[in-house]
Amino acid sequence: MIQSPEAKAKPTDPKSGPVYSDDQGRHARMAAFWSATLLSLFGCTFLHTLLVGVDSLSEPLGGLRIPVVSIDVTGAFLISTGVFAGLLLAIRRWQERPKTIQLLVGTESELRKVTWPGLDEVMNSSLVVVICVVFIGAFLAGVDYVLARVMSYLLLGEV
């Protein structure tokens, strides 16, 4: 059985599986972290807007204000910030799991094998897509117009 050079280079730990260097899968791990972080930030800002609707959570606590960004320290702000910090810790712990690391390193390894199209191929493919979308859109608009006229005639007796 022939092994790839990547498989030969990975020492294994009996408890957690293959041991990876910090540089392996760095881009995939970074993309996964920032994607999950931005999704968490979106969720926490939505949570904050919901909590501001509660009267007791929307009042500044003791008149405190963060001076540089002029944000009032409210119950809603503290809760949403705490949830965001907890989610960041959970994301970091999730990324340190051996199976997650193995998935992200494998993903980046496979993406390095992909043959990406050149500019000419992308331009030609995009042109074909745009032409097809315009053609199908015009066809559907025509069919919609004809069916609307037919249904208007059948249901309302108008031409």
Image: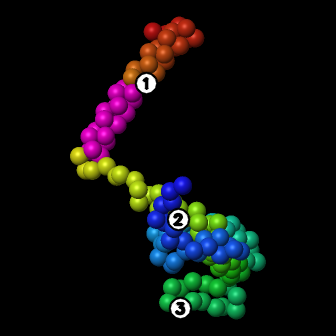
Percent position of residue 74, x then y:
68, 82
Q: Give the CA distance from mark 2 to mark 1.
A: 52 Å
In the rendered image of this protein, does residue 12 appear above or below residue 109?
below
Task: Decide if residue 11 is on the left or right side of residue 54.
Answer: left
The three-letter code of the residue at mark 2 reads Ala
Percent position of residue 149, x then y:
46, 14
- Marks 2 and 1: which is nearer the front? 2
Disc 3 marks which residue?
67
Disc 1 marks which residue?
140
Q: Nearer the viewer, residue 89 or 99?
A: 99
- The quarter of the picture where the N terminus appears is bottom right
Q: Of the two numbered discs 1 and 3 on the same chain, state the one appearing first in sequence.
A: 3
Looking at this rendering, what residue extends furthest in the left direction?
Answer: 120
Percent position of residue 64, x then y:
64, 91
Dominant SS in magenta: helix
The three-letter code of the residue at mark 3 reads Pro
Disc 2 marks which residue?
7
Marks 2 & 1, CB-CB < 8 Å contact = no
Q: Residue 36: name its quadrant.
A: bottom right
Please, what secondary structure does the residue beneath circle 1 have? Answer: helix
Tell how many labels: 3
Residue 22 visible somewhere in the drawing: yes
Q: Of the two numbered discs 2 and 3 on the same chain, state the one appearing first in sequence.
A: 2
Q: Give the CA distance from mark 1 to mark 3.
A: 57 Å
Q: Give the CA distance from mark 2 to mark 3.
A: 53 Å
- Marks 2 and 3: which is nearer the front? 2
Q: Residue at x 53, y 85 (%)?
A: 70
Q: Nearer the viewer, residue 33 or 3?
A: 3
Q: Of the two numbered discs 2 and 1 on the same chain, state the one appearing first in sequence.
A: 2
Q: Which residues are magenta?
A: 121-138
Q: Residue 123: name its quadrant.
A: top left
Marks 2 & 3, CB-CB < 8 Å contact = no
